[in-house]
Image (tube, grey):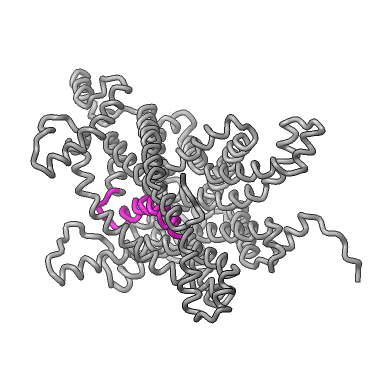
């Protein structure tokens, strides 16, 4: 038996996270999904865009485990390709929205004269009808951007930016609240009294301490972004029809729903599973990062 | 309380004006020409005439001003005329849809009942299911019911409406054939049988929307109940011999409802957003479907007006939530 060693804070967090079974399962499922869409093309070497009209609308078979679609394209390959786009959109939009939210939150919390205007701005953004505005943005800017950056990059940029700038508000509010509370703490005042500059203060003392709410909103942000992208694709205002994303696959398959329901189920389950996994992960993170919750049980 | 309500309502006006401006500028700054879909065989002079007829020759600030005037002065007068038979607005121009050439508000008035019926029913049903689930799973925390309930609400929360909608169509409409997959908005309720038909076709859209509502609100209800169940006043109530039903159903429930009521009020606009997708799936011709078709047809006045109305909804329900919070919780005093 070894002597009990002092725990590091990150070790405590990990221990608590491990105890939340749902969160661990969520993390494992999310990682599996990410790894399989990343490494999938290396193992399943079928071109997702290859059209073979002789084998269209097939069910599950050895050569096509998920069947084929109305143009005879392999569904497994399309699911993998679609997953890459959906995950990329989810992660990029999440990073953008977290970065914006943290920036606004820290600025509002640290500088008194910016606090009022920035929080009014946040309130205004919260009062905007987001889904309609997203639809309008995509409709209006789609063509210009696809001409400038090429169809795929243009739409990718548009959707990521659109989701990012419409979902930063909750993060900004939480971060601002935490920063305001932190500013009154002794260690920040001590740091200030020894002449810490503002930049150092933010990077050394403020940001590490608001990391936990940021992580939680990051995990929820992925879920939100994936759902929003799929909703846009579903309403016909996302990626172009031949371009596979999970939302697009689902939208395409709804036309054939009475005859081939399985083609709706695959992408739908993939989206829901990702969202569920990420939400559980966020739940576990929230418990694990909150030291008070840790000692409650 | 009254002064607080009044102040909030007055403060809402600049907010709404700003939102209207944001929506207008977004439509304005966007590249793309509303007459771009006109066939190339139409000569440029005629095209110019069409632009003038749409009012596009005027500078943007004038068009924004005109929209504001028509929305806030002309439209209320139209209502007044319709209600009291006066004729203030006989020849006053109103906000006209480019698609149908009829006043936007008339179309909105036609579409609103369908949306209100489906959304309203879904919300009521969702809340009615959510509250008991939340209460019971908090009361028996970590029990099987709680674990299963938490998992089911998590799943319900994770399944996006465009998937759950398609799923219920597959199960209840295609496989079982119980309910129609298309909502027939021309159906009129005249007697008991047609009322049953109406109920029957509302089941699926309401089910999809209320799944979202239920999973969100039951989670809030559960955590609010948990916060209150461990309070001292609960122990006091038990100690003085009150029955368990009274303790949980009256004392704890009342206090837990305070945050939940505001969440319920805050969720209303979100449900209207979710209705956009549900209406597309079940072909309900309500507001959401109107918005989608207007967006696809580049009908800017319609898009502007409907989006703005959704914004009004959000702002109003935010204010309502704050006021309810103050009314329900005597600890919160608004000056």
Residue at x 42% of width, y 55% of height: B327
Residue located 72% across and 31% down the image: A198
* The furthest residue to the top: B45
Total number of numbered discs in the rendering: 0
Is A184 displayed left or right of B17 in the figure? right
The residue that appears at 59% across and 68% down in the rendered structure is B231
Where residue A238 appears, x then y in whole percent? Answer: 42, 44
Q: Is residue A80 magenta?
A: no
Left or right, A209 with respect to A82, comes to: right
Question: Quadrant location of residue B100?
Answer: top left
Q: Position of residue A244 (x, y in %)?
A: 47, 49
Q: Nearer the viewer, residue B304 or B17?
A: B17
Magenta residue check for B273: yes
Which residues make up the magenta segment?
Answer: B260-287
- Does A144 appear above or below B254? above
Q: Is residue B114 visible?
A: yes
Give above or below for B40 relative to A20.
above
Which is nearer the eye, B42 or A126? A126
Please name the residue shown 75% across and 30% down the image: A197
Image position of A81 with respect to B50: above or below: below
Q: Position of residue A259 (x, y in %)?
A: 34, 64
Is residue A115 left or right of B153 when viewed as pictured?
Answer: right
- Main secondary structure found in the magenta portion: helix
- State whether residue A71 appears in this view: no
Residue A225 percent coordinates (x, y): 51, 48
């Amino acid at each position: 038996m070894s002597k009990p060693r002092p725990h590091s804070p990150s070790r405590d967090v990990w221990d608590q996270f491990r105890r939340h079974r749902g969160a661990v399962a969520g993390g494992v499922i999310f990682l599996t999904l990410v790894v399989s869409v990343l490494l999938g093309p290396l193992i399943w070497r079928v071109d997702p865009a290859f059209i073979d009209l002789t084998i269209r609308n097939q069910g599950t078979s050895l050569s096509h485990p998920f069947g084929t679609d109305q143009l005879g394209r392999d569904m497994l390959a399309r699911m993998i390709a679609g997953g890459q786009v959906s995950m990329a959109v989810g992660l990029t939009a999440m990073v953008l929205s977290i970065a914006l939210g943290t920036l606004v939150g820290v600025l509002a919390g640290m500088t008194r004269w910016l606090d009022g205007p920035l929080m009014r701005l946040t309130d205004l953004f919260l009062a905007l009808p987001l889904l309609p505005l997203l639809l309008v943005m995509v409709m209006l800017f789609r063509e210009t951007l696809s001409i400038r950056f090429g169809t795929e990059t243009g739409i990718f940029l548009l959707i990521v930016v659109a989701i990012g700038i419409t979902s930063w508000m909750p993060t900004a509010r939480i971060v601002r609240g935490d920063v305001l509370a932190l500013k009154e703490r002794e260690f920040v005042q001590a740091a200030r009294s020894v002449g810490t500059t503002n930049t150092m203060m933010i990077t050394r003392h403020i940001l590490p301490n608001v990391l936990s709410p940021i992580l939680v909103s990051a995990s929820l942000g992925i879920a939100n972004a994936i759902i929003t992208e799929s909703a846009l694709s579903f309403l016909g205002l996302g990626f172009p029809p031949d371009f596979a994303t999970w939302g697009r696959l689902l939208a395409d398959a709804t036309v054939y729903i009475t005859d081939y329901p399985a083609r709706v189920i695959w992408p739908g389950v993939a989206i829901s599973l990702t969202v569920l996994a990420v939400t559980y992960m966020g739940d576990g993170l929230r418990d694990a990062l909150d030291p008070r919750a840790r000692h409650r049980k | 309380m009254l002064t607080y309500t009044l102040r909030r309502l007055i403060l809402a006006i600049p907010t709404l004006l700003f939102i209207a401006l944001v929506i207008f500028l977004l439509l304005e700054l966007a590249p793309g020409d509303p007459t771009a879909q006109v066939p190339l065989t139409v000569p440029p002079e005629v095209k110019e005439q069409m632009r003038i007829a749409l009012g596009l020759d005027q500078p943007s600030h004038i068009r924004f001003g005109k929209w504001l005037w028509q929305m806030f002065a002309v439209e209320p007068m139209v209502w007044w005329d319709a209600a009291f038979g006066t004729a203030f607005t006989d020849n006053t121009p109103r906000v006209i849809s480019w698609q149908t050439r009829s006043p936007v508000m008339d179309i909105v008035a036609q579409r609103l009942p369908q949306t209100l019926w489906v959304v309203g029913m879904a919300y009521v049903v969702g809340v009615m299911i959510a509250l008991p689930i939340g209460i019971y799973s908090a009361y028996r925390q970590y029990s099987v019911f709680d674990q299963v309930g938490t998992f089911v609400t998590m799943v319900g929360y994770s399944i996006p409406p465009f998937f759950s909608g398609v799923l219920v169509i597959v199960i209840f409409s295609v496989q079982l054939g119980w309910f129609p997959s298309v909502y027939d908005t021309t159906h009129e309720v005249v007697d008991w049988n047609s009322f049953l038909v109406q109920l029957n076709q509302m089941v699926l859209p309401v089910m999809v929307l209320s799944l979202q509502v239920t999973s969100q609100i039951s989670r809030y209800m559960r955590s609010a109940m948990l916060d209150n169940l461990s309070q001292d006043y609960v122990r006091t109530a038990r100690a003085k011999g009150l029955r368990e039903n009274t303790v949980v159903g009256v004392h704890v429930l009342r206090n837990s409802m305070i945050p939940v009521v505001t969440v319920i009020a805050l969720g209303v606009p979100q449900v209207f957003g979710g209705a956009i997708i549900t209406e597309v799936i079940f072909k309900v011709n309500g507001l959401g479907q109107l918005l989608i078709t207007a967006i696809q047809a580049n009908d800017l006045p319609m898009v502007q007006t409907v989006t703005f109305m959704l914004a009004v909804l959000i702002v109003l329900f935010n204010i309502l939530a704050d006021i309810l919070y103050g009314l329900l919780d005597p600890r919160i005093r608004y000056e």
